[in-house]
Image (tube, rainbow, N blue to C red):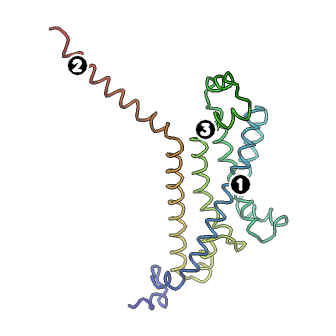
Amino acid sequence: MSKRDCLVANDWICGEYVRSRSQELIDATVEHVAITASSVAIGVAVALPLALLARRWRFLAAPILGVTTVLYSIPSLAMFSLLLPFFGLSASLVVTGLVLYSLTILVRNILAGLQAVPDEAREAAKGMGYGPLRLLWEVELPLALPALLAGVRITTVSTVALTTVGAIVDYGGLGTLILDGLDTQFKAQVLTASALCVALAIAADLLLLALQRLLTPWTRAHRIRPGRFARKAGAANSVAKVAEPV
């Protein structure tokens, strides 16, 4: 069967579809990445002050976490419908919905990271004359970075998946191709767009994992060091046993 025949036969795997629709696939992927990146970036910008409020005034923690959890529980179709009067059929509608979904993970992780900062580190910084803002940016946020980046990774992968739902308003990136393919029973388009969506999620997770390892080298050192100490201790014990008098 020739390459052209796979389109006629409506095969699931069709190289001719990828070749002939390559620009369409690229445009959809770029839109998918742009919506995902914008949603996560805005989500972090909104979640950080909310987490700081919850950390500063403890009585606000439960309401903030409760509201973000309720937002996450709203079905995506209902969420977009509720936002439709404010944003119309636009990319802003999809981005706003995805930002609201991202808050439940981001706020919890940022708050957990800030609460895990040792009091000794804060007291030492205050003793060196650090003010509240400098303490936050130079001490607390760097120490909370592992938890923050872990939240960003989870949020990014889930946002890549949720972006496809934006296809219902024609701003879903690869999701638009998937929906169109389902409507027309175009198998190659459905499979190719779905595979690209999965590949995008995996690539984003690996990229953020590499960034997390680059920005938080002390977490790797903390994991490696006990093993080294254990080996050294074991060697020392062995030498001591050999040196013991009979």
The three-letter amino acid code for the residue at tag 1 is Ile
Q: Position of residue 235 (x, y in %)?
A: 27, 24
Frontmost of labels 2 and 3 is: 3
What residue is rendered at 60% in x and 71% in y?
174
Q: Residues within 10 Å of mark 1 (few under 14, many from 20)?
A: some
Left or right position of 62 against 184: right
Frontmost of labels 3 and 1 is: 3
The three-letter amino acid code for the residue at tag 2 is Val
Looking at the rendered structure, the secondary structure element under dot 1 is helix
Q: Position of residue 78 (x, y in %)?
A: 75, 62
- Mark 3 — residue? 142
Where the C terminus falls, by quadrant? Answer: top left
Left or right position of 137 against 221: right
The numbered mark, 3 or 1, whose residue comes first in the sequence reads 1
Q: Residues within 10 Å of mark 2 (few under 14, many from 20)?
A: few
The three-letter amino acid code for the residue at tag 3 is Pro
Looking at the rendered structure, the secondary structure element under dot 2 is helix
Label 2 to label 3, Cα distance in Å? 41 Å
Is residue 108 or residue 46 the one in the foreground?
A: 46
- Mark 2 — residue? 239
What residue is rendered at 66% in x and 24% in y?
128
Label 3 to label 1, Cα distance in Å? 20 Å
Indicate whether 67 appears above or below 3: above
